[in-house]
Amino acid sequence: MTATELKKLSVDDLNKKLADLKEELFNLRFQLAINQLENPMRISAVKKDIARVSTVLRQIELDTKEA
């Protein structure tokens, strides 16, 4: 998911997306620990998505403080 797509979402949707991604990352790490992970690159992709969502949320927070 790109930052442009994330900027179109509401704050509630972004928070839900962030929670879902964190849960997915937990599950991926669990699968890695028990050697059932099929695609290890998915972990880094999910981490990057979490960072993107967090960045967009922070930008929205700063924009509302300025206004």
Image (tube, rainbow, N blue to C red):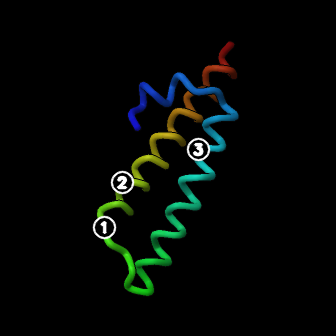
User: Which amino acid, by three-letter code, is at mark 1?
Assistant: Asn
Residue under label 1: 39
**Which of the two labelled residues, at mark 3 and mark 1, occupies the earlier sequence position?**
3
Residue 49 position (above or below residue 13): below
**Which of the two labelled residues, at mark 1 and mark 2, occupies the earlier sequence position?**
1
Residue 46 position (above or below residue 36): above
**Which of the two labelled residues, at mark 3 and mark 2, occupies the earlier sequence position?**
3
User: Residue 46 sits in which quadrant?
Assistant: bottom left
Residue under label 3: 17
Are the residues tagged 1 and 2 within 8 Å (C-beta)? no
Give the structural element (helix, strand or loop) at label 1.
loop
Residue under label 2: 45
Relative depth, front residue between 52 and 27: 27
User: Which amino acid, by three-letter code, is at mark 2?
Assistant: Ala
Give the structural element (helix, strand or loop) at label 2.
helix
Identify the residue shown where x is 37% and y is 85%: 35
User: Which amino acid, by three-letter code, is at mark 3?
Assistant: Lys
Relative depth, front residue between 64 and 13: 13
Give the structural element (helix, strand or loop) at label 3.
helix
Where residue 27 appears, as percent x and y from the top left, is 52, 70
Are the residues tagged 3 and 1 within 8 Å (C-beta)? no
**Foreground disc of the pair 1, 2:** 1
Screen quadrant of the C terminus: top right
